[in-house]
Structures are given as C-alpha cells and as structure tokens.
Amino acid sequence: MALLYNNKSVLENLHSSLTFTLLVRPDLNFLAQFSSDEFTQLRHMIISAILSTDMALHFDFVKSLKERGKLTMATKDEVSLMASSIIKAADISNVVCLCLIHFIFI
C-alpha cells in the first residue's frame, strides 16, 4: 500500500479509495442523482475530510485552522474545512475514549 500511495497518508488514501469504490456500486450509489459538478465537489470534500485524519499532518491542520479564525460557512472551502474538522474530532475522540476506558477499567 505504501508503494501504491507513495508513502503519503497511506491508510487515509486507502479509506478514501474504498469509500468511493463502495459508493459507486449500483446498489449503494445514492450519488448518481448528483450532477457531475456536485459529485466532484462532494468527492473532494469527503476525500479532504478523510485525509485530515492523518496524524502526521495534525499540527499543520490545527495551525491552519487557528490562522483562519472563525468559520462563517460562507464559502465551499470553509464548509469543507468544517467537515474535515468534524471528522478529525471524531477520529481523535475515539482514541481518547479508548484510553479512558483502559485507565478506568484496567
């Protein structure tokens, strides 16, 4: 996989690829009703959100988020950044929950 994805966000790229492999299956393809432009925008936002979970890029992501300040959700870029932030928070909170369970019960 590292060779396939050039050692960059290997698992995240795999997850993005698998997501769209599933989403274009005829029995799961709710995206077929989207226009080509809408599909491209949604695909970009989903891939960006998944790639944002790469912890190797965590501090760069946080820095860029802080530099932006408050998100107004007025642009597609800000909506995409918010989606990435939500997925990233969910990804990180999973580890935090597991650590808490470990320290409480073990």
Image: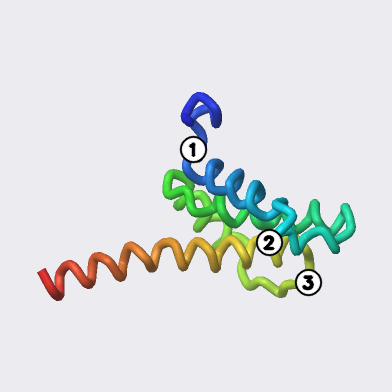
SS category of the residue bearing label 2: helix
Query: How many discs mark residues in the rendered view?
Result: 3
**C-alpha separation, residue under disc 1 versus residue under disc 2:** 21 Å
Name the spot of residue 76 as percent of width and height, x first: 77, 63
Q: Is 15 situated above or below 66?
A: above
The residue under label 3 is 74
Residue in the picture at 40% in, 62% down:
92
SS category of the residue bearing label 1: helix
Residue in the picture at 74% in, 55% down:
26
Q: Residues within 10 Å of mark 3 (few under 14, many from 20)?
A: few
Residue type, numbered disc 2: Ser
The residue under label 2 is 80
Q: Nearer the viewer, residue 19 or 58?
A: 19
SS category of the residue bearing label 3: loop
Which disc is residue 10 wearing?
A: 1
Q: Quadrant of residue 65?
A: bottom right
Tell me which numbered mark, 3 or 2, is placed earlier along the sequence.
Answer: 3
Give the left or right position of residue 64, taking residue 101 as reference.
right
Name the spot of residue 18 as percent of width and height, x first: 58, 47
Q: Nearer the viewer, residue 80 or 46?
A: 46
Give the left or right position of residue 61, taking residue 27 as reference.
left
Residue type, numbered disc 1: Val
Q: Nearer the viewer, residue 59 or 31?
A: 31
For the C terminus, which image quadrant?
bottom left
